[in-house]
C-alpha cells in the first residue's frame, strides 16, 4: 500500500495494519501524524525541550512495542496521551533537577514584552504545580480534552481529574494574582482571601 493511501486511513486502522500486517509504514504515518501533539504535551508537562524530546522518544518506542496491546476501547489519541503522561511521569521521577530556565524571547515591541512576561509568568506558575495537577490542567485547558478523556489517559477517576484541575487552576490564579474562571456549570474556585 502506498504512503498516500495509508495517510487517508484513521488511527485505529493504522494500528490494525501495523499489528496484523507488520506494516512499518503504517506506524510511521501514525507517529508522524501525532509527533507534534506528543511533543507539545510532553513539553508542557516537563517544562523544557530536552526532557520533552526524551519523553517523546520513549512514547514512540512504546507505541511501536505496545501497539498490539491497544484494545480499541477508546480513541487512539486517548491511549497515546496515556503513554505520554506515563513517560513524562517516569521521566520526571528520574530527573532530580528543576526544569531549565525559560528560553530567551526575541522582542520587538512593548506589547511583545508584555506578552513574553505573561508567558514566562504562566510557565513559572505551571512549573510550581504538582505534576498531577499540571498534567490535568494542560490536558483540559490547552488540549481541550474532556474530563472522561483525561481520566482515561491518566488512569484516574473523573472526580479526581476535576479536583486536580480545580486545585491547579486555583494555585495558578493565586500565583498570578487572579481568580480562575470556572467551567460552565462549575462552582467558582474558592480562594482564601488575602489578609490585609
Image (cartoon, rainbow, N blue to C red):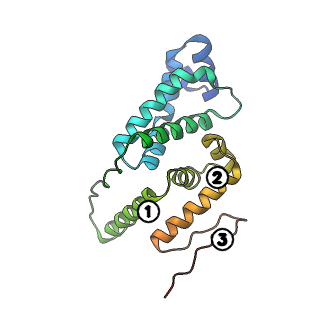
Decide which of tag 1 and tag 3 comes sooner along the chain. 1
Q: Which is more toward the observer, 159 or 73?
A: 159
Left or right: residue 184 versus residue 179 is: right
Mark 3 nearby-residue class (10 Å; few <14, some 14–19, many ≥20): some
Q: CA distance from mark 2 to mark 1?
A: 19 Å
Whether residue 4 is situated above or below residue 94 in the rendered picture:
above
Report whether residue 32 is seen.
no
Local SS, label 3:
loop
Contact? badges 2 and 1 (CB < 8 Å): no
Locate the N terminus by quadrant.
top right
Whether residue 70 is situated above or below residue 148 in the rendered picture:
above
Q: Residue furthest top?
A: 21
Q: Determine the image quadrant of residue 104.
A: bottom left
Contact? badges 1 and 3 (CB < 8 Å): no
Local SS, label 1:
helix
Contact? badges 2 and 3 (CB < 8 Å): no
> Picture coordinates of residue 76 (x, y %)?
62, 32
Q: CA distance from mark 1 to mark 3?
A: 20 Å
> Picture coordinates of residue 144 (x, y %)?
59, 51
Q: Which mark is residue 188?
A: 3
The residue located at (38%, 37%) in the rendering is 53
The residue located at (52%, 81%) in the rendering is 194
Decide which of tag 2 and tag 3 comes sooner along the chain. 2
Q: Determine the image quadrant of residue 121.
A: bottom left
The residue located at (61%, 20%) in the rendering is 68
Local SS, label 2:
helix
Q: CA distance from mark 2 to mark 3?
A: 16 Å
> Picture coordinates of residue 153 (x, y %)?
61, 41
Q: Which mark is residue 161?
A: 2
Q: Which mark is residue 125?
A: 1
Amino acid at each position: 500500500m502506498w504512503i498516500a493511501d495509508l495517510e487517508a486511513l484513521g488511527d485505529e486502522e493504522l494500528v490494525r495494519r501495523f499489528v496484523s500486517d507488520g506494516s512499518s509504514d503504517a506506524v510511521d504515518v501514525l507517529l508522524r501524524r501525532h509527533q507534534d501533539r506528543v511533543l507539545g504535551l510532553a513539553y508542557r508537562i516537563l517544562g523544557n525541550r530536552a526532557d520533552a524530546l526524551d519523553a517523546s522518544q520513549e512514547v514512540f518506542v512504546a507505541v511501536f512495542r505496545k501497539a498490539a496491546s491497544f484494545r480499541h476501547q477508546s480513541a487512539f489519541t486517548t491511549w497515546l496521551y496515556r503513554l505520554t503522561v506515563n513517560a513524562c511521569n517516569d521521566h520526571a521521577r528520574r530527573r532530580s533537577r528543576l526544569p531549565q530556565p525559560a528560553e530567551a524571547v526575541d522582542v520587538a515591541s512593548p506589547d511583545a514584552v508584555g506578552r513574553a512576561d505573561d508567558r514566562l509568568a504562566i510557565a513559572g506558575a505551571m512549573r510550581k504545580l504538582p505534576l498531577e495537577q499540571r498534567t490535568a490542567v494542560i490536558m483540559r485547558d490547552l488540549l481541550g480534552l474532556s474530563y472522561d478523556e483525561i481520566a482515561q489517559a491518566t488512569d484516574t477517576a473523573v472526580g479526581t481529574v476535576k479536583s486536580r484541575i480545580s486545585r491547579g487552576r486555583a494555585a495558578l490564579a493565586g500565583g498570578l494574582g487572579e481568580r480562575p474562571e470556572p467551567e460552565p456549570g462549575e462552582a467558582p474556585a474558592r480562594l482564601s482571601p488575602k489578609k490585609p
